[in-house]
Image: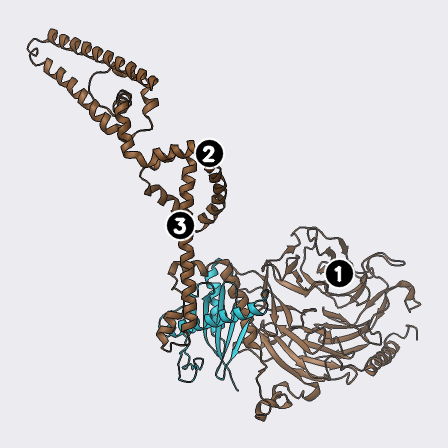
């Protein structure tokens, strides 16, 4: 049953991931090209004068999967920034130990947490809200 | 040159002869015509002459035009058969004739055609000959190059080799002429590839430069759109590319892996950034006040629900038939499921492995073609899971493999032909067997490596003084210490001790001297005491039955010689040490792995009870119910089938039943936990059992040794 439609199996996985409590947005990036493969959710980037990384999310209404329409330009921008971040971290790790590699990046900010799972070919990013702090 | 002149002379002579023949022929024709009709006499010569003229004209044109286009075929074509062609003077110009005469005339005007062809082909032929004739050493160089070309050619074809090929073909006008010389072509190819490589290099460099620029520019540019545009070296993928990426195995693997990791990260409840100095509301939450739902079990004896596992896709409308914690990874717990009657296309049997740190989805899903009735992690290999099915098959799954079983027993008479309600893995790390027992009384031993055929097969029968020989085992249990001795609980309620092999004084099969009688309905579960303490309690067995009771037994030592009863032989019926009557059918009971007097019981009313016989032998010390799921169907679906303890610490309990939800509880320090068992508890259990035994045997039988 499941194997018959591989497309749906991974998209349901992503759907479940993005519908988890607190998850604001998910982005899948191609690691080598940097192209966005899939996004979900909403994320708005506000560049305040103080810092680049101070992001704020507007109330997230869960959008359908794979829609590269409204709100996705911000996500693409986020993807670009994350890609850059991952690449520079990779460079850092390569400098420390050339045989090492990154397995997971958890980036906690005051408002959010970015969980980034880098892979040789793809990068999965999940932005979720910290509850209760 | 001399030879050439001779050749030309000879050809001229031939030509002259041909002309003569033609003239003869035309004269003949005109003569014939003249003889046929005199009226046409006047006109007849002119067409003949016209024919001749046209012929010549044609020849000339062909010489001039045809020669340039076909230089290769001059020699051999001319040498073909000029005489035959000469015999056909009529100028009915067919395609075949045209080509023939073309080659023929080529030989005639060889000298003319040569300069002509040279003038058009200067680039191709002339330098070609000079290279090969005068420079033998560069030829060797070419060889070495061509080796290099071979390797790069492979590289080229991977990226865009085919295109490069066709390009080079179409670019060269005189490709046909050069195609004969392979070396030359390879040289050209090499040039071409060099060019391509350079292009690629250039592109990569540009890309890198762009990336560097982006990295440098990034922080400087503040406008959002420009950052996105400039920083991202990406191009948007087309729909096709996107499809190709997302349908690749690699991508699905990635999604599977990384989403699991991220879900685990998100499910991690503890906030490592918690600041306990800031406020008390987060800091001191680990207190008793939130266990209101656990009905009076508080403090050190609490039983708290920590997780409930249910998968909308797979758990739906299935019953849990087996639960087991992984001996290696205490956070993993498996659940076996029966079929979903409303989904005939899904596999009937299902085993899901749940992770305590991954709440929304199972870590692994395994399928079976028939309802799974029993499932267990292999204690000797953390990747393997064995299961018994309604079809009588035994399955072996591997967490490193896909969801289908890696091995299964065949559906033949060689093994089980009735449902397998109990499986176990017995032995040691280096020598262990899968033991399975089906309801027709067949017990099979299998090697883990080979499930095609049982290694041992034993048919259990009810000992003589009964109406029928048939024995219907509903459950089976091995003691911790003896891999050759076990108990089976039967459908009629009697529990029989059995031997796997022949022994001194007893044959393989049911031991006819002893039986454990007390249950009045099918025995649903049996559990030997785990006995990992200072006092050996390994002979204690806990059984549950549909007669609404839980019973505690002390099992006689299996060896015939050490049987305490001097009344050796005929059917000594042993009574239970302790009889706990409950308010509903009792499906399962399990000893705590760490506390000697603690066990848990699940019943048909959906209750989980935790008992500690060192504290009380009348009432449970804790009683809880798993929280109902919102869409739970009815009262009936609350029934719990199975209970299992986490083996290493004894802090967690998993229960599951009709509604397909697996619920995990955490117990307080008085019930479980690593260092909670004190030595005196072990001795007190021992004493209690001895006391109970003396009273029961005294009252019921009065024969056994006292």
- Depth check, mark 1 against mark 3: the one in front is 3
On the image, the x and y values in percent for residue B378 come to 70, 63
Q: CA distance from mark 1 to mark 3?
A: 84 Å
Numbered mark located on residue B471 in the image: 1
Q: Earlier in the sequence, mark 1 or mark 2?
A: 2
Secondary structure of the residue carrying numbered label 2: helix
Residue of label 3: B195
Quadrant of the image for the C terminus of chain B? bottom right
What's the distance in space between the residues labelled 2 and 3, CA to CA? 26 Å
Chain rendered cyan: A
Question: Which residue position is annotated with label 2?
Answer: B136
Query: Do callouts 1 and 2 mark residues in contact (Cβ within 8 Å)?
Result: no
For this orientation, the residue located farthest to the top is B35
Q: Position of residue B340 (x, y in %)?
A: 55, 65
Same chain letter for marks 2 and 3: yes
Q: Are marks 1 and 3 in contact (CB under 8 Å)?
A: no
Mark found first going from the N terminus, 1 or 3: 3
Q: Tag 3, which secondary structure?
A: helix
- Residue B132, given in percent of the width and then of the height, sits at 42, 33
Q: Nearer the viewer, residue B145 or B645?
A: B145
The chain identifier of the residue carrying mark 1 reads: B
Chain B, colour shown: brown
Residue B193's place in the image compared with B553, above or below, is above
What x and y, as percent, mark residue B545?
A: 72, 72
Task: Tell me how many marks there are.
Answer: 3
Let me know if residue B242 appears in the view.
no
């Amino acid at each position: 049953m499941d194997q018959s439609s591989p497309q749906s199996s991974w998209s349901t996985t992503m759907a479940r991931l993005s519908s988890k409590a607190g998850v604001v947005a998910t982005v899948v990036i191609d690691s080598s090209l940097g192209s966005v493969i899939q996004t979900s959710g909403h994320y708005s980037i506000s560049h305040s004068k103080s810092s680049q990384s101070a992001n704020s999310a507007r109330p997230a209404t869960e959008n359908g999967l794979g829609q590269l329409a409204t709100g996705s330009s911000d996500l693409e921008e986020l993807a670009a920034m994350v890609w850059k971040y991952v690449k520079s971290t990779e460079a850092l790790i390569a400098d420390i130990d050339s045989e090492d590699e990154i397995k997971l990046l958890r980036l906690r900010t005051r408002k959010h947490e970015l969980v980034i799972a880098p892979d040789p070919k793809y990068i999965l990013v999940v932005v979720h809200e910290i509850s209760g702090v | 040159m001399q030879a050439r002149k001779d050749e030309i002379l000879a050809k001229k002579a031939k030509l002259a002869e041909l002309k003569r023949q033609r003239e003869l022929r035309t004269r003949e024709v005109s003569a014939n015509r003249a003889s046929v009709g005199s009226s046409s006499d006047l006109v007849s010569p002119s067409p003949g002459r016209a024919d001749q003229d046209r012929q010549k004209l044609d020849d000339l044109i062909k010489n001039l035009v045809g020669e340039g286009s076909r230089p290769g075929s001059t020699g051999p074509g001319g040498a073909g058969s000029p005489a035959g062609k000469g015999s056909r003077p009529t100028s009915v110009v067919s395609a075949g004739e045209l080509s023939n005469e073309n080659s023929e005339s080529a030989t005639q005007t060889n000298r003319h055609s040569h300069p002509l062809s040279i003038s058009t082909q200067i680039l191709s032929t002339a330098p070609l000959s000079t290279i090969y004739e005068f420079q033998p050493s560069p030829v060797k160089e070419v060889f070495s190059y061509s080796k290099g070309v071979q390797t790069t050619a492979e590289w080229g074809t991977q990226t865009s080799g085919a295109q490069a090929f066709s390009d080079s073909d179409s670019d060269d006008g005189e490709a046909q002429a050069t195609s004969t010389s392979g070396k030359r072509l390879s040289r050209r190819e090499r040039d071409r590839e060099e060019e391509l490589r350079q292009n690629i290099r250039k592109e990569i460099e540009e890309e890198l430069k762009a990336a560097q620029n982006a990295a440098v520019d990034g922080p400087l540019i503040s406008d959002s759109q420009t950052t996105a545009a400039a920083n991202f070296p990406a191009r948007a993928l087309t729909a096709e590319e996107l499809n190709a990426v997302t349908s690749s195995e690699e991508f699905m693997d990635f999604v599977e892996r990384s989403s699991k990791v991220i879900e685990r990260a998100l499910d991690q409840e503890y906030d490592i950034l918690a600041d306990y100095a800031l406020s008390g509301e987060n800091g001191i939450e680990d207190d008793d006040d939130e266990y209101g739902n656990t009905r009076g079990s508080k403090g050190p004896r609490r039983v708290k629900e920590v997780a409930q596992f249910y998968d909308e896709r797979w758990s739906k409308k299935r019953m849990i038939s087996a639960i087991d914690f992984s001996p290696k990874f205490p956070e993993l717990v498996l659940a076996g499921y029966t079929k979903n009657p409303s989904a005939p296309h899904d596999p009937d049997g299902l085993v899901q492995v749940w992770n305590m740190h991954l709440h929304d989805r199972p870590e692994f899903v395994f399928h079976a073609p028939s309802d799974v009735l029993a499932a267990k992690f292999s204690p000797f290999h953390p990747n393997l899971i064995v299961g018994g099915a309604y079809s009588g098959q035994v399955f072996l799954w591997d967490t490193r493999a896909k969801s289908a079983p890696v091995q299964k027993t065949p559906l033949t008479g060689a093994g089980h032909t009735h449902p397998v309600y109990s499986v176990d893995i017995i032995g040691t790390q280096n020598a262990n067997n899968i033991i399975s027992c089906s309801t027709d009384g067949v017990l099979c031993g299998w090697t883990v490596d080979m499930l095609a055929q049982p290694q041992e097969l034993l048919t259990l029968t009810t000992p003589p003084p009964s109406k029928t020989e048939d024995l219907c085992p509903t459950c089976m249990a091995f003691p911790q210490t003896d891999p050759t001795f076990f108990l089976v609980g039967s459908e009629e309620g009697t529990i029989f001790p059995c031997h796997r092999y022949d022994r001194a004084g007893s044959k393989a099969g049911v031991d006819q001297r002893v039986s454990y009688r007390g249950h009045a309905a099918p025995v649903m579960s049996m559990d030997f005491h785990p006995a990992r303490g200072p006092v050996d309690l390994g002979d204690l067995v806990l059984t549950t039955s549909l007669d609404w009771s839980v019973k505690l037994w002390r099992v006689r030592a299996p060896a015939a010689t050490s049987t305490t009863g001097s009344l050796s032989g005929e059917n000594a019926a042993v009574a239970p040490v302790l009889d706990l009557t409950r308010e509903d059918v009792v499906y399962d009971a399990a000893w705590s792995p760490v506390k000697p007097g603690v066990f848990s019981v699940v019943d048909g009313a959906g209750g989980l009870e935790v008992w500690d016989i060192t504290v009380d032998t009348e009432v449970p010390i804790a009683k809880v119910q798993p929280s109902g799921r919102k869409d739970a169907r009815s009262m009936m679906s609350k029934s719990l089938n199975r209970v299992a303890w986490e083996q290493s610490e004894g802090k967690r309990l998993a229960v599951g039943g009709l509604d397909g939800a697996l619920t995990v509880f955490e117990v307080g320090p008085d019930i479980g936990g690593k260092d909670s068992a004190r030595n005196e508890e072990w001795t007190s259990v021992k004493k209690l059992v001895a006391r109970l035994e003396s009273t029961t045997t005294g009252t019921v039988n009065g024969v056994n040794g006292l």
